[in-house]
């Protein structure tokens, strides 16, 4: 578990559990981001003009799943861990007939594997806007598929209790 | 400047930058035409040597970490799967998803198995009395019948 005395270049895990006590594998990388990510962020801002790029990042300390499920404290890279959180925390998948609302979770899957997640911030004219973190880059609020993960199928989840 | 020239890394760098999971990154690199082009241009032996070279030290920047993944995925496309096995056995502690991606590539590496069976085709309407169907499958899937 996390040891504040270790050097920052040593990746560490946080004690992170589901509501049922299942341990969630995670990795927090506190070293400064690689040189070159700033240029990628500039390229992303140029490529995605109709979204809100939050003035944060780059950071390898957390990823999209860390933003969605762990309050930006760590990175969760394995799809099975995200699936475990959904199951053991008690999230329900919304039927296609139910529109998502602010606070719901958007899960992006490619061939069944979870590749991205975000939090629904708003629904405008039927279009969900999602807050997500784009890898080691920055956080973005964007129409659900106006992002680098647009090959994915998106489903929405809600925690009712 | 990459260990092998000419290689265009920009699209791969973007994939590394926005990847939240190793599976996403592996898939984007497998789709990247520059990766397969590198294999065609340089061959597995030179790419393996380049991977050894870049993996030997902590990556100094995004390009360096991208090169590691790029060469690993390129080697997974080589018909001779021993290149991938040798690469997967490397110790690359400074590249956080090296092991995950190597495992993913190893799991999904398709080894085509072709076996011709001579079967008597009984019980199928409107079929010749004897056919020679082909079975094609992978190491990870059940063989499936293909139409002849």
Image (spheres, rainbow, N blue to C red):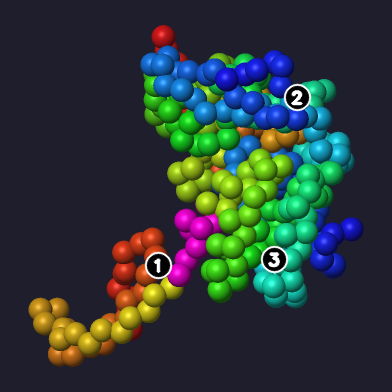
Q: Nearer the viewer, mark 2 or mark 1?
A: 2
Name the side, left or right, on which A108 lies relative to B134: right
| Residue for badge 1 | B138
Between B103 and B18, the one lying in front of the other is: B103
Q: Nearer the viewer, mark 2 or mark 3?
A: 2
| Residue for badge 2 | A7
**Residue lying furthest left in this view?**
B123
Residue at 75% across, 24% down: A7
Q: Which residues are magenta?
A: B104-111
Between A62 and A25, the one lying in front of the other is: A25
Q: Quadrant of the N terminus of chain B?
A: bottom right
Same-chain status of marks 2 and 3: no
| Percent position of residue B84, x then y | 58, 63
| Percent position of residue A10, x then y | 70, 29
How many other residues sit within 10 Å of disc 1, few (<14), some (14-19) or many (≥20)? Answer: some
Q: Secondary structure at mark 1?
A: loop
Q: Measure how far apart labels 1 and 3 are at the Cα level.
A: 25 Å
Query: Disc 1 vs disc 3: Cβ atoms closer than 8 Å?
Result: no
Image-quadrant location for residue A122:
top right
Name the side, left or right, on which A104 lies relative to A47: left
Q: Is residue B90 magenta?
A: no
Q: Chain of mark 1?
A: B
| Residue for badge 3 | B48
Q: Earlier in the sequence, mark 1 or mark 3?
A: 3
Q: Secondary structure at mark 3?
A: helix
Residue at 76% across, 25% down: A8
Q: Nearer the viewer, mark 1 or mark 3?
A: 3
């Amino acid at each position: 578990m996390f040891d504040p005395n270790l050097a920052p270049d040593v990746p560490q895990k946080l004690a992170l559990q589901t509501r049922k006590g299942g341990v969630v594998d995670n990795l927090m990388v506190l070293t400064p981001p690689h040189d070159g990510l700033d240029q990628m962020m500039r390229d992303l801002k140029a490529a995605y003009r109709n979204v809100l790029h939050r003035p944060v990042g780059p950071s390898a300390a957390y990823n999209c799943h860390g933003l969605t499920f762990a309050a930006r404290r760590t990175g969760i890279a394995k799809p099975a861990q995200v699936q475990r959180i959904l199951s053991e925390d008690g999230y329900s998948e919304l039927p296609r007939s139910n529109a998502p609302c602010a606070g719901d979770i958007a899960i992006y899957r490619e061939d069944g594997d979870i590749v991205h997640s975000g939090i629904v911030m708003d629904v405008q004219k039927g279009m969900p806007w999602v807050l997500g973190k784009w890898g080691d880059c920055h956080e973005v609020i964007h129409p659900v598929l106006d992002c680098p993960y647009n090959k994915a199928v998106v489903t929405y989840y809600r925690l009712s209790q | 400047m990459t260990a092998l020239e000419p290689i265009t890394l920009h699209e791969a760098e973007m994939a590394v930058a926005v990847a939240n999971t190793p599976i996403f990154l592996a898939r984007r690199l497998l789709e990247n035409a520059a990766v397969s082009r590198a294999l065609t241009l340089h061959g597995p032996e030179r790419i393996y040597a380049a991977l050894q070279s870049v993996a030997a030290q902590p990556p100094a920047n995004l390009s360096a970490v991208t090169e590691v993944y790029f060469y690993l995925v390129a080697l997974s496309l080589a018909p001779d799967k021993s290149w991938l096995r040798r690469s997967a056995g490397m110790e690359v502690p400074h590249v956080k998803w090296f092991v995950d991606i190597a495992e993913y590539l190893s799991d999904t590496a398709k080894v085509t198995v072709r076996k011709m069976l001579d079967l008597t085709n009984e019980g199928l309407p409107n079929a010749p009395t004897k056919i020679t169907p082909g079975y094609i499958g992978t190491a990870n899937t059940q063989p499936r019948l293909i139409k002849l």
